[in-house]
Image: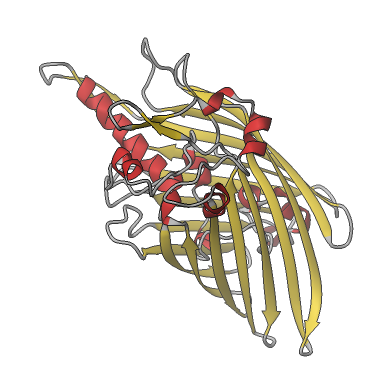
Amino acid sequence: MMRILKITVVLTVLVGLNINGAFAQYDYNELLSEKEYNPIRTGVPFLMIAPDSRSAGMGDAGVATTPDEASIFWNPAKLGFIENDFGANVSYTPWLRQLVDDISLYYISSHYRIDENQTIGASIRYFSLGDIQFTDESGNELNTFNPNEFAITGSYGRKLGEFFSMGISAKYIHSNLTGSNTTTHPGNAFAFDLGMFYTKELRVNGQNALMNYGMSFTNIGSTISYSDDIKNFLPMNLRLGGAFMYEIDEYNSIGATVDFNKLLAPTTTYIKNEDDDFIIAEETTDVSVATAIVESFYDAPGINGMSPFEEEIKEINTSVGIEYWYDKKLAFRSGFFYEPKEKGNRKYVTVGAGFKLNVFGIDVAYLIPTTANNPLKNTIRFSLLFNFDAIAQP
């Protein structure tokens, strides 16, 4: 029984570290003893996994790209400028396949335009950590448990002018990692997202162009707990970005985008105990959510000889991507994601492609790590897109 529970915890930690923390092949305490690594720790890190293949093909950048079916995740304000009236997205991502073969992320989203200025949307993401077989002390099989997490989101986006829109989302989060027993229970939380989006058409060298800016605050909400005495902050997050699209001619267009991303959860502070081991200096989850967000901009302790300000800058991740379209039907994408080694050391190149018809489209993305022994190696995503407007057209 304890052996199986241990496996569950290990899988959970591996997923968490690869979203917000150091690589899983290292021992966390060993990293801290070297005073080089101090990743931010949060609960339910699955909320930060890019769910769609388009943005995943551009280095996980999406806060300012042209609105699409995954806008609910990246920036709900983009819904105000989405082109079609009714559409949907279905995405599937096998996760951490270098380690196990049955962890997967599923994502479904849809939107409906109420009028010229207002659009509503909804999404559900489901994260399955596979099946675990429980046994007794003698190795006899008892029951099978499937640790899983999901989030249900409702969104509203509205134009507030010719070039500007805002959006808000509310979400319910459920995380069941250990099953129900006498010491733990599933975690539940509520959160909201707030986004802003600015877009303007331009003329560059006599050709049409588009400049976008986006900002989103996501997963701002309650803490989540699996026991009565330990609470975890959600992966509260600030994302800023810009995107530029340029029509080369009637059939060819190209765009570039960049996102800057910072977690708004507290940075853990450590001290050494009498055994010369690093331990947490204080329970940072005792502060309110509002206090945690404010302090997240200046609470880094300064590791590896850095000043607190230098470490704070290291908590910003960067995503850059490019996207080429031929005849608005065939797309090719590439990007790069960079996270400083002190905060997780995730660095990878992404490539992707897409094909769009009137009603139906498909996107695929593939991740290529630039660091050794990366458990995200060979991550592939698939997305199906549906434009229901085309069905209604005669």
Q: Which residue: 39% across, 16% down?
A: 180
Q: Quadrant of residue 287?
A: top right
Q: Nearer the viewer, residue 318 or 333?
A: 318
Figure quadrant of the N terminus: top left
> Which residue of the protein is positioned furthest toward the top in this rendering?
182
> Which residue of the protein is positioned furthest toward the left in this rendering?
138
Q: Position of residue 222 (x, y in %)?
A: 61, 27
Query: Horizontally, is 363 left or right of 82 in the view?
Result: left
Q: Which residue: 63% across, 44% down?
A: 297
Q: Position of residue 156 (x, y in %)?
A: 75, 43
Q: Position of residue 315 (x, y in %)?
A: 53, 50
Q: Quadrant of residue 190?
A: top right
Q: In the figure, 208 relative to 378: above or below?
A: below
Indicate the colouring scheme. secondary structure
Q: In the figure, 178 relative to 45: above or below?
A: above
Q: Is residue 393 visible?
A: no
Q: Nearer the viewer, residue 110 or 255?
A: 255
Query: Horizontally, is 83 left or right of 275 in the view?
Result: right
Q: How many labels sit on residues?
A: 0
Q: Which residue: 23% across, 26% down?
A: 4
Q: Nearer the viewer, residue 205 or 25?
A: 25
Query: Horizontally, is 164 left or right of 125 in the view?
Result: right
Figure quadrant of the C terminus: bottom right
Q: Which residue: 48% across, 33% down?
A: 43
Q: Position of residue 366 (x, y in %)?
A: 41, 63
Query: Horizontally, is 249 left or right of 313 in the view?
Result: right
